[in-house]
Image (cartoon, rainbow, N blue to C red):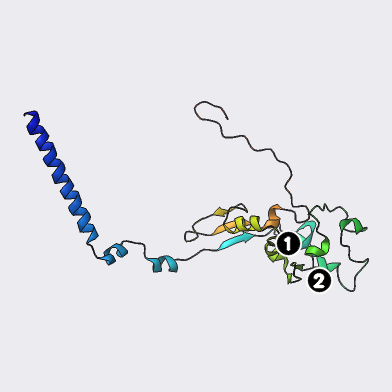
Amino acid sequence: MSPKLRRALIITAAVIGGVIVAAVFATLLQQPEDEFVAEQPDEQLVAEAEIYDDIIVPPAALGELKTGITDLHGKPVGVKCSTCHTEGNKREPAADTPAQLSDFHTDMEFDHGQLSCSSCHATDDRDKLKLADGTQLAFDDTIEQCAQCHSSEYRSFKHGAHGGASGYWDRTEGARVRNHCVTCHDPHDPAFPDVTPADPPRDRFFGTTQ
């Protein structure tokens, strides 16, 4: 085959290919719009899919004084604050800082900014906490109180990037489980101590950790 004939055949094939591609695109563009919509996920089915719970696990005996005793099921036994902090059982004026304590809670570590006891605890009901505006809330709602000051951490918490999330990210597949703020942070001394990171995994070929 002569070079000229070969070149002519290549040009002819390229032209035919271009015509075919153009025809395919023209056909796709002429399809009715509803045919494209039919290929998309059914939004109604997605909206009606079962959304599993976002489970937040609070620590045992939240809002109670730990006694070191466990019940028959191995669960910690706590004592409610109102057991001692009641109108008829005031052995001393309500303290507002650990330095004012002389009898009880004296071993408590307290390092939480400029906060005092009454910054978070309701003074007239020690079984309740309170928000900055004075609204009282149960100990189970501690996260709402923490969020007042720790907004960036709370934002991360809501999106699952804080709180040691486990389970399913896609909650149409299963529940997501996360820790409560005070599961990991002591509310009276919340800062984490200095820790040493774990060694990286060993390389299976070279046996190094670098």
Looking at the picture, how far across and down is residue 39, in whole percent? 31, 61
Residue 62: assigned label: 1
Residue 180: assigned label: none
Q: Residue at x 73, y 41 (%)?
A: 194
Closer to the camera, 199 or 43? 43
- Residue 115 appears left or right of 180: right
| Image: 81 above or below 22 | below
Closer to the camera, 79 or 155? 155
Looking at the rendered structure, the kind of residue marked 1 is Leu
How dense is the environment of label 2, judged by Cα within 10 Å: few (below 14), some, or many (20 and up)? some
Q: Which circle's residue, 2 or 1, is located before the other in the chain? A: 1
Mark 2 vs mark 1, foreground winner is 2
Q: Residue at x 65, y 38 (%)?
A: 197
Looking at the picture, how far across and down is residue 200, in whole percent? 59, 35
Secondary structure found at label 1: loop
Position of the N terminus, as image quadrant, is: top left
